[in-house]
Image (cartoon, helix red, strand yellow):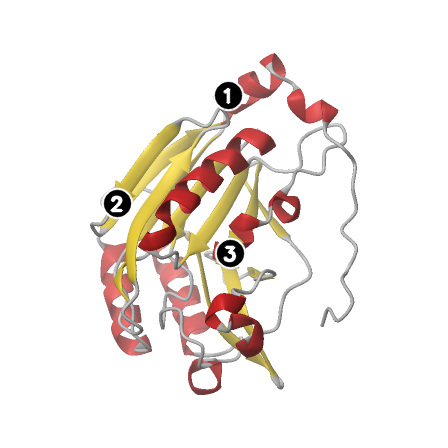
Amino acid sequence: MSSLSFTLIQTQLHWEDKAANLAMLEKKIMGIPERTEVVVLPEMFSTGFSMQPQKFAEGMDGETVLWMKRVAAFQKIILTGSLMIAEGDYFFNRLLWVLPDGTLGYYDKRHRFAFAGENKAYTKGHKRLIAQVKGWKINLQVCYDLRFPVWARQHTTDVPEYDVLLYVANWPERRAHAWKSLLTARAIENQCYVIGVNRVGNDGNGIFHSGDSMAIDALGNTLYHQSIEEAVHTIVLQKEPLLEIRDRFPFWKDADNFKIIPKDGDE
């Protein structure tokens, strides 16, 4: 039965310093001791959670995107994480999914954190990205999306829509209980694995992040959890236990069909 390995990189970030962050992250990636297939970086891994895209955003042919392609190719991994992207007059908090051959997909964060002004600095996304690798389907989401379960909800027909729900984040320690609780809830209600990768340390606004990066199975059991400290951890997910859970408890078959209707003013 199929397995898929993920390496979760929980790290401090240099505030608004791309060169320092890319150098630091490349060292961590090159130092991964075991073979891995998907390496997951935090939200806005090249800058921290900054509201200054006018200064730091780049195009899809920019420095950070090219770095991701180079590292993915050299290490023969899939590399994912979000960064500031500029397209014309618009800025996006964009998660990239970069394959070793340079092919990439992307997801633009839908739910912007208005409490920090993200709704004013960035344009919201409208489409989910469910990536596929080795027969696995992975739903890619960013930070504040976690608070909105409809956006992550499985659309089930004959089979569940995805197997892994992945969140990258800059989630403050003061709301860590919500982070851990909601990751667990998303796993249980969608009968899937959930991976959450968060940063640690203080950002440029003095906000402390405790990390609490996690991997959770479809029953809500914690497979991995790291708080406070930096960590590079590889976990291998197995498809067979997931299928057994879905066969034994086929709750997903009773889910409601639904459609997300755009709100007035959606950009």
The residue sitting at 29% across, 70% down in the picture is: 21
- Read off the residue under disc 3: 144
Can the viewer see residue 37 in this picture?
Answer: no
Relative image position of residue 256 (x, y in whole percent):
76, 33
- Read off the residue under disc 2: 227
For marks 2 and 3, give the CA distance. Answer: 19 Å
Label 3 vs label 1, nearer the camera = 3
Residue type pointed to by label 3? Tyr
The residue sitting at 71% across, 38% down in the picture is: 155
Give the numbered dot on residue 200. none
**Above or below, 85 relative to 263:** below
Give the numbered dot on residue 240. 1
Whichever of callouts 3 and 1 sits on the residue coming sooner in the sequence is: 3
Pointer 1: residues within 10 angstroms few (<14), some, or many (20+)? few
State the SS at label 2: strand
**Above or below, 218 relative to 62:** above
